Image (spheres, rainbow, N blue to C red):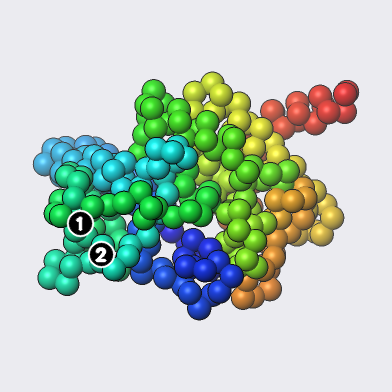
Amino acid sequence: SGWDFSSRWLADPTDLSSIQTSAVVPVDLNAFLVQMEHNIADFAHALDDLEAEQRFRALAARRIKAMEAVLWDPDSKEWRDFILDEKTQLAPEDGVIETGADLGGECVHSRSSINVARHRHIPVQSGGRSRVQCAANFLPLWCGCTTEDSHHARAAVASFASSSLICAGGIATTLENTGQQWDFPNAWPPLQHMLIEGLSRVGGTFGKSLAEQLACRWIESNMLGLESTGYMHEKYDVREIGRCGGGGEYEPQVGFGWSNGVLLVLLENYGAQFIAHLEARCVA
């Protein structure tokens, strides 16, 4: 999924030695695999390979069903990483998580590329879902895991809009200020891009409006940062528009490819709205 050190992977957010990546069933990784399964099915359709198309459509549908059963949190109305414990480890003979629900699908676990959610006899407890709220929890909106008219899309968009992830300078990576790169207060361009597009695709009228606001906010932050420092930055600080991000195990990088790419895409899609936004603010 591209995430480096983050509170998502830590049993104790204050202690890097508590990293437990191999015990995490990640939302974004499984969402990306749904997207890849849909992409392969689309390619198969273009090549008139009906058998492959049907097979990968079925795989995507099974994974979506498993994600809804294991990763969807009905209380917070978002998907959440699932943290395995000693009772829900990969069975050594087949790499499958034992669960009580008939999930009819598969969620990929970081130790294996094969089935992680199938039907057996150890119940998946809601307490197994991560308590970390992060931008990745909403990436299924972008990956084709839900549709505009679905309950999950409406609920997740409303949950995201009311979350504390939306800040002055963009969408925060998480709400945990640990000093790690993929935590608060950093905002990463690919996450902005995916969430803006996801809101626009399946969020209805409200989602499109929110996507426009977030796109204009990100464009402005990039422009101010470029004006004040002379560089585009790999990540930005959500607490202040135009401020570059920090933290992690190396010096922040400048002139960064994905920052440039995301800004160009947003300017293409929202450039007129951004200019209107600036003009309206000047008039006010």
Please determine whether, in this image, residue 246 is positioned above or below residue 68. below
Left or right position of 148 against 99: right
Query: For the point 74% across and 51% down, which residue is it?
Result: 239
Please determine whether, in this image, residue 121 is positioned above or below residue 40. below
Left or right position of 125 against 92: right
Instruction: Say which element carries label 1.
Output: loop
Of labels 1 and 2, earlier in sequence is 2
Q: Amino acid at mark 1?
A: Ile
Assess disc 2: are there few (<14), some (14-19) or many (≥20) residues with their C-alpha within 10 Å of its C-alpha.
few
Tell me, yes or no, if residue 34 can be seen here.
no
Query: For the point 17% across and 72% down, which residue is it?
Result: 92
Q: Position of residue 218 (x, y in %)?
A: 68, 43
Task: Tell whether label 2 touches label 1 (CB within 8 Å).
Answer: yes
Residue designated by label 1: 122
Nearer to me, 60 or 247: 247
Assess disc 1: are there few (<14), some (14-19) or many (≥20) residues with their C-alpha within 10 Å of its C-alpha.
few
Query: For the point 62% across and 71% down, which residue is it?
Result: 248
Q: Position of residue 65 (x, y in %)?
A: 26, 41
Query: For the point 55% across and 66% down, which residue is it?
Result: 13
Q: Amino acid at mark 2?
A: Lys
Q: Which quarter of the rendering shows the N terminus?
A: bottom left
Please determine whether, in this image, residue 188 is positioned above or below residue 55. below
Q: Position of residue 259 (x, y in %)?
A: 63, 54
Q: Position of residue 164 (x, y in %)?
A: 63, 43
Instruction: Say which element carries label 2.
Output: loop
Residue designated by label 2: 87
